[in-house]
Amino acid sequence: MFKYFIVVALLVFVPFEAYAKTIKIDGGGVVFNSPVGFEPLSQRMMRAKFPSNGAPQNVIGNSLATTTIAYDIKNHKLSQTTLGYTRDDLLKTLPKLIPGLVWKQNKIIRHSGQKWIYLEMTSKAVDTGIYNIMMVTDYKGKMLMFNFNSTIEDFTRYERELRKSIFSIEIK
């Protein structure tokens, strides 16, 4: 009886954090932790959310896909020395492609032993505001991209988990 009391007391009174899934990219060459409850999007949701030909290959998200993490390795050549040029190109191109883009941050950061392009922005979709955090770096001479995307409404709920996921990215 005392054992059950201890177990119940621990469950009720001791806060615990659910463990996220570890996502492996390229056979584990790149790993990151997903927010709790995020699952791969169905093909139907992928087509609806990313109708263009340049859509990411991998997307996980909450059940309504209002907050997602897209990740991909693109065949665009990229290196640590050309990262600054790529950032400059993105800063010129993205405002032309994304309606109502407002930069929160756009810089080069160091993470997981190398430089990354870090772009944080808000924009407008047809029916809601969007909060995006993009991270780009080179991986085996190609472009490794992450897009942490959320409706403005959802962002306050998921921000902490998304940022934890960002800083869990590790290149092996």
Image (cartoon, rainbow, N blue to C red):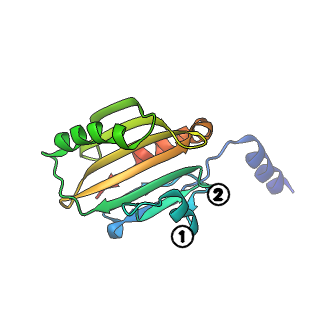
Tell me if residue 169 can be seen. Answer: no
Would you say 127 lies left or right of 81 here? right
Q: Residue at x 59, y 40 (%)?
A: 128
Q: Toward the viewer: 159 or 4? A: 159
Percent coordinates x, y for residue 114 in the rendering:
23, 45
Q: Which residue is mark 2?
A: 63
Q: Describe the element under mark 1 as helix, strand or loop.
A: helix
Question: Is 66 placed above or below 119 here?
Answer: below
Q: Which residue is mark 1?
A: 43
Mark 2 is on which residue type?
Answer: Ser
Percent coordinates x, y for residue 121 in the rendering:
42, 35
Would you say 158 lies left or right of 134 here? right
Q: Describe the element under mark 2 as helix, strand or loop.
A: loop
Q: Toward the viewer: 24 or 81? A: 81
Q: If you read the primary sequence from the N terminus, does the residue marked by circle 1 or circle 2 appear first? A: 1
Report crowding for label 1: few under 14, some 14 to 19, many 20 or more residues within 10 A (C-alpha).
few
Q: Quadrant of the N terminus?
A: bottom right
The alpha-carbon separation of the residues under discs 1 and 2 comes to: 14 Å
Mark 1 is on which residue type?
Answer: Gln
Q: Toward the viewer: 4 or 118? A: 118
Percent coordinates x, y for residue 136 in the rendering:
30, 48
Query: Residue reaching furthest right?
Result: 1
Report crowding for label 2: few under 14, some 14 to 19, many 20 or more residues within 10 A (C-alpha).
few
Q: Quadrant of the C terminus?
A: bottom left
Would you say 144 lies left or right of 31 here? left
Say the numbered circle drawn on residue 60. Answer: none
Q: Toward the viewer: 172 or 70? A: 70
Tell me if residue 148 can be seen. Answer: yes
Q: Residue at x 70, y 42 (%)?
A: 14
Q: Nearer the viewer, mark 1 or mark 2?
A: 1
Q: Residue at x 16, y 47 (%)?
A: 80
